Amino acid sequence: MIPESHRIENEKLVADGYVDLFQIVLKNNTNLYLKNNNAVNWQSKSWQGIPLSFEGYSSSSTEELSRPSLSIANPNGAFSTYIRDGLLNRAVLYRYRVLYKDILEDNNVYQKQTWIVWSTPSLTNKYIQFELRTTLDGPNFVVPARQYLPPEFPCVKL
């Protein structure tokens, strides 16, 4: 027998939604706390409401790395000085996915993802667009000292 409370919860048309909170750690260790639209207070931090768009993120079972982009409103060039001073070059971006209920109750429950601000393909006085890469996606990899390639290893196919 299914409890009545489970049946009622199952039949709700509106589920608790996720809220995306963005923390950008600049090169001088300054933190920017941003959220789309309205501002909220969560975990003793004030997340500033500003128009932004996070696009291009996908997760894959084949471990393909997505390269999302983040577009942020740049009213009167407010964030342009960060770019001019090089503070956003290779800055770290954290996305916190939090249930709306957990923001209201100030619960420390979230999913955290990390990216590096890789480039700024678009900059105007109205908005900035950042291309993001994962911390594992970049030119900092070292080719192994020993490579297993044919003809020395005939069983290996390229």
Image: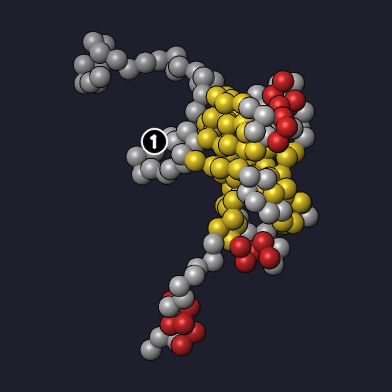
Q: Which residue is mark 1?
A: 64
Q: Residue at x 62, y 31 (%)?
A: 128
Rendered location of residue 4, percent (x, y): 46, 88
> In the image shown, does 92 or 81 lie closer to the viewer?
81
Above or below for 46 versus 65: below
Residue situated in front as seen by the camera: 89 or 140? 89
* Res 107 visible: no
Which residue does the image show at 44% across and 18% down from the upper left? 144
Label count reads 1
Query: In the rendering, at what x and y percent does residue 57 appear?
Result: 47, 41
Image height check: is 55 above or below 40? above
In percent of width and height, residue 108 lies at: 67, 59
**Residue located 56% across and 37% down the image:** 70
Q: Is residue 130 left or right of residue 10?
A: right
Q: Residue at x 32, y 17 (%)?
A: 148
| Quarter containing the N terminus | bottom left
Describe the colour scheme in one phrase: secondary structure
Could you say whether the residue bearing mark 1 is in a helix, strand or loop? loop
Front residue of 56 and 150? 56
Horizontal side, residue 40 vs residue 20: left or right: right
The reply, left or right, for residue 110 in relation to residue 75 is left
Q: Give the quadrant of residue 100.
A: bottom right
Quadrant assignment, res 119: top right
Q: Is residue 150 above or below residue 14?
A: above
Q: What amino acid does circle 1 point to?
A: Glu
The x and y percentages for residue 130 are 58, 31
Q: Is residue 158 visible?
A: yes
Q: Residue furthest top?
A: 151
Q: Quadrant of the C terminus?
A: top left
Q: Residues within 10 Å of mark 1 (few under 14, many from 20)?
A: few
Residue 41's image quarter?
A: bottom right
